[in-house]
Amino acid sequence: MKIKKLYDWGPSHSNAIPRLFLESMQIPDEAKTVIRLAAENRIKLVIVGANAVNVYSGKPRYSRDVDFVCDKPKKLIALIKKNLPSLIIREYEVVYRIYKSQDEADRDEEFIDIIKPYSDLILSALAKTSKFQGFVIPTAEVLVALKYASMISPNRSHEDRIQDA
């Protein structure tokens, strides 16, 4: 895996962060469409999880899905259903899980998670952000807090919590 580091210490809100261009960061076309739909409809959408961690660490971490925090998830899901009708969407208490096929849904192998704004921490992920290569990511401090919350969450399997450590 090839990583090309470009340190652009440009301002990002009140903070300056190193901007790392990760050639290995794979955002599926459907996720790019979700980002476009959100932008066109004034929906705040922030990439979290491994893809956001990769921006700060410069050490790519594989993730099979793209995780987003969204301020208007119901509106975004309606747009996804209209514009990407082949996708399978399942709603859970704190997240919408999106699958490419029924087979992947049956195996619970999502490729996009849309996290609902259900807590103060999630709301801070929407409020404290930086821009990177056209994507919006949380600040490093918020991202660390999100990863820690994920690691100790009783709603996650033991294997997933260990992966987050």
Image: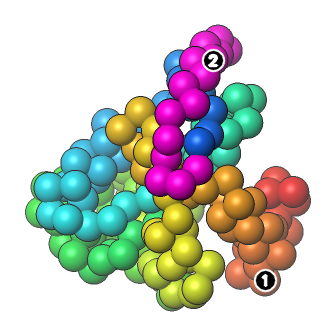
- Crowd band around label 2 with a 10 angstrom C-alpha radius: few (<14), some (14–19), many (20+): some
Whether 49 is drawn above or below 119: the answer is above
Residue 129 percent coordinates (x, y): 50, 58
Along the line of sight, which residue is nearer the eye, 60 or 44?
44
Can you tell which mark lies on residue 154? 1
> Considering only vertical position in the picture, is 117 above or below 125?
below
Point 82% across, 54% down: residue? 163
Q: Secondary structure at mark 1?
A: loop
Q: Position of residue 138 (x, y in %)?
A: 55, 57
- Taking the image as shown, residue 30 lies to the left or right of residue 108, namely left
Residue 86 can be seen in this image: no
Q: Say whether residue 57 is magenta.
A: no
Q: In terms of image quadrants, where is residue 160?
A: bottom right
Q: Please provide percent x and percent y for residue 122.
A: 55, 76
Tag 1 or tag 2, which sits nearer the N-term? 2
For the record, the magenta segment spans 1-15
Amino acid identity at mark 2: Lys
Task: Name the residue nearer the viewer: 29 or 109.
Answer: 29
Point out which mark residue 66 bears.
none
CA distance for labels 2 and 1: 36 Å
Dot 2 falls on a residue whose secondary structure is loop
| Secondary structure character of the magenta stretch overall | loop
Q: Quadrant of residue 75?
A: bottom left
At 61% from the left and 40% from the top, the residue drawn is 17
Label 2 sits on residue = 5
Q: Nearer the viewer, mark 2 or mark 1?
A: 2
